[in-house]
Amino acid sequence: MISVTDARKTYGDFVALDGVSIDIPSGSLTALLGPSGSGKSTLLRSIAGLEGLDGGVVSIAGVDVTHQPPQKRGIGFVFQHYAAFKHMTVRDNVAFGLTIRKRPKAEVRKKVDDLLEIVGLDGFQHRYPSQLSGGQRQRMALARALAVDPQVLLLDEPFGALDAKVRADLRRWLRRLHDEVHVTTVLVTHDQEEALDVADRIAVLNQGRIEQVGDPVSLYEKPANDFVMSFLGSVARLGGQLVRPHDIVLERDRAAAFEADARTPGSPGVVTATVERVVRLGFEVRVELRADSGERFAAQVTRAEADRQQFGPGETVHARATRPADATEVDPALAI
Amino acid sequence: MRTSRGTTLALRSVALVYLVGLLAVPIGVILWRTFEPGVGAFVASVQTPAAISALNLSLLIVAIVVPLNVLFGVVTAIALARWKVPFRGVVQAVVDLPFAVSPIVVGVSLIMLWGVTGWFGGLESATGVKVIFGLPGMVIATIFVTLPFVVREVEPVLHEIGTEQEQAASTLGASGWQTFWRITVPAIRWGLTYGVVLTVARALGEFGAVIMVSSGFPGVSQTLTLLVHSRYIDDHNTYGAYAAATLLMGLALVTLLGMTLLDRKRSTR
Ligand SMILES: Nc1ncnc2c1ncn2[C@@H]1O[C@H](COP(=O)(O)OP(=O)(O)OP(=O)(O)O)[C@@H](O)[C@H]1O
Ligand SMILES: [Mg+2]
C-alpha cells in the first residue's frame, strides 16, 4: 500500500500540493485524474522521490520513505516521453536495473527476454529506441520498469504522446497486464475516458487538492461536487441543476412530462425548450436545445428514441431528468 | 522565395573562392614547399634534436592539459546545466573570458602573477619550482586559452538531453555515480569528443601566451609552434619552418581523424 499524508509542495508562492492525503491499496490500479496544472505529476513524482516534499509523509508498504532517494523506494517509473536510454539497445534498456543490481548474466538475459515477450517486443532485442515507434518505446519503458520487480509502478501520462487509437489499445493492454502482474499501479492522466477505462480507483485532483477518491462507478454516479461531476463525463444544466445529458428525457406531451416528473423527487423540474439541432453520433443522438429562459443545453437520446419521436429543429419539447442530480450548488462556469 | 540559377552559382563561387583563397591556398603552399625537395628532406628536418624535443614538449603539454580540461569542463558544464549555481552569469562570463582576452595578455598577466617579482613569486624562491620560463607556466598558459572548449561543447548537449533519462536511471536503482557513467557520459560523448579535439588543436597551436612564459631555448623549452617561429625569424631557416609547420598540421589532422574513427567505432548511431 502507498500512503501519502498531508503532502505539501510549493514552488515559490505557488502551491502545487495543498495538503494531499491518499491511500492507495496494494494491487490496485489507481488513476490520478485532474486538469492540467492540478498537481498530478507533482504528487506522483513525490511518491517516486523525484521531487522532495515541503511537508507531509510518504510511505510505501508501511515504510516511511519520505526522505529516501528514488533508488531506495522499490518503484518503477514510466515517463510520458519514454526516457529511453538512447545509446542502448532494447535489451540493454530493459536489463539496466538488473545490471545495476549485478544479477548473473544468464538470469538477466532470461528475465529480459521473458519481459519483452510479455510486452510484445520479442525479436526487437537488438534494436535501438530510435528504431521503435512511440507505442513500442513506451512498452519497452514499461518492461524496463517492471524488470526490477517494483513494489509499485508509477506512470506519468504514459500514453499522452501517442495517437488516439494506439492510446486506447495500450491502456487496455496495460489493464490486462495489471490483471496478470498485480503490481500496485498509479497512473496519471488528464483524460477521463482513460481513467474510467483502466482504473479500479480514481482520485480527482484540482488545484493541488484531492476532490474525491473512489471507484469509477461511484464517482460517475455520485460525484461529491460539481467539479468532479463535470470533470468525469459530460453534464448539462437543467433548471439550475447539473445533470447527465443521457438522463434527460424529452417529451412532446406537456402533461405527460409533468406527470412523470412528479414521480421523481428532487428533480430539477420540467423545462420547456426549442430544438435547435439534432446531431447523430452513431448509436446515440444529441439533441441541442434552447430553453425558454434562453439557456442552451444538450440531451442525449438513443437512436431508437429519436426515430420514434422524429425531433426536428424549431419544434417545442419538454425536458425532464430521470433522476435527481447529486450536485446541489451550481457553478454556471461548469455547465456546458 | 526561389533564388535564380545565376544567383546560386554566384553565391557558390564566392564561398568557394573564400575557402580556397583563405584556407586551401596557404595550406597547399606550405605542403608544396615542404615536400618540394623530397620526403627525405622533410624527415631530416623534423628529426633534428631541437625538433624532436619540441614535438615531445608539445605532446607533453597536450597530455597534461587535456585530462585537466576534460575534468574541469565536464564538472563545470554539469554544474551550469544541472545545479543551482549562484552568480550563473558571472560563471558563464568567466568561462568565456579566454575567448575574449588576447593570448599575449594572458602571458603577461601570468608573468605578473607567477614571475619572481609577482604575487606568487615566493613559491619559486621557496621551492625552486620554476613556473614562469618552465613547464608549469606553459601548461597554465595553455589551460587558460583552452578552458572554454569542453564546457562550451558539453553544456548545450546536457541541456538538450534533459534530465529524464537520468531520473529514469535513478528510479531503476542507479546511484548518482552509476547514472553519470552509464547514462550521462555516453550521452555527452559527442560534445566531449568535439571539445577534446578543439582543446588538442588549440593546445598544439597556441603561440602568444606560451611565447611569453617560455624561456624558448631550442631543444629545451620550445614547443612546436615556438620552433616554427624561431626557425623562421631567428635562424632564417625557412624550409625548417615549413617542415615543422607541416608536422604541426599533421598532428592536428591525426587528432581529428583519430577522434572521428574512435567515435564511429563506439557510436551506436
Ligand atoms: N519546477 C517547477 N517550478 C515552478 N512551478 C512548477 C514546477 N513544477 C510544477 N510547477 C507548477 O506546479 C503545478 C502542478 O504541476 P504538475 O506538473 O504537477 O501538474 P499536472 O497536474 O501534472 O499537469 P499536466 O496535466 O499539465 O501535466 C503547475 O501549475 C506547475 O506550473
Ligand atoms: Mg503532468
Image (tube, grey):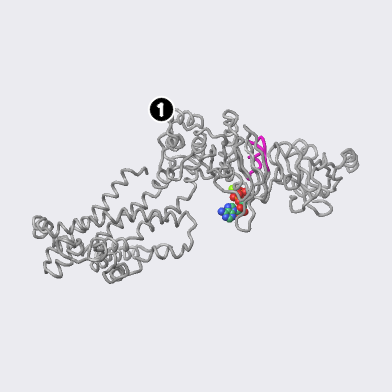
Where is mark 1, residue-wise?
A106
Give the letter of the chain under mark 1: A
Quadrant placement of the N terminus of chain A: top right
Q: Position of residue A123 (x, y in %)?
A: 43, 31
Q: Residues within 10 Å of mark 1 (few under 14, many from 20)?
A: few
Left or right of A255? Residue A148 is left
Left or right of A111? Residue B50 is left
Q: Position of residue B77 (x, y in %)?
A: 41, 56
- Closer-to-camera residue (A297/A211): A211
- Tell me which residue sits at (14%, 66%) in the image: B231
Q: Secondary structure at mark 1?
A: helix
Magenta residue check for A193: yes
- Closer-to-camera residue (A57/A132): A57
Left or right of A47? Residue B125 is left
Left or right of B223? Residue A259 is right
Which segment is the magenta one?
Answer: A190-203
Q: Position of residue A10 (x, y in %)?
A: 62, 54
Q: Is mark 1 within 8 Å of ligand 2?
A: no
Q: Position of residue B122 (x, y in %)?
A: 29, 67
Magenta residue check for A119: no
Outermost residue toward the front in this view: B126
Count the marks: 1
Answer above or below: position of B148 versus A132: below
Q: Tell me the quarter of the picture where residue B21 sits.
A: bottom left
Identify the amino acid type marked 1: Ala
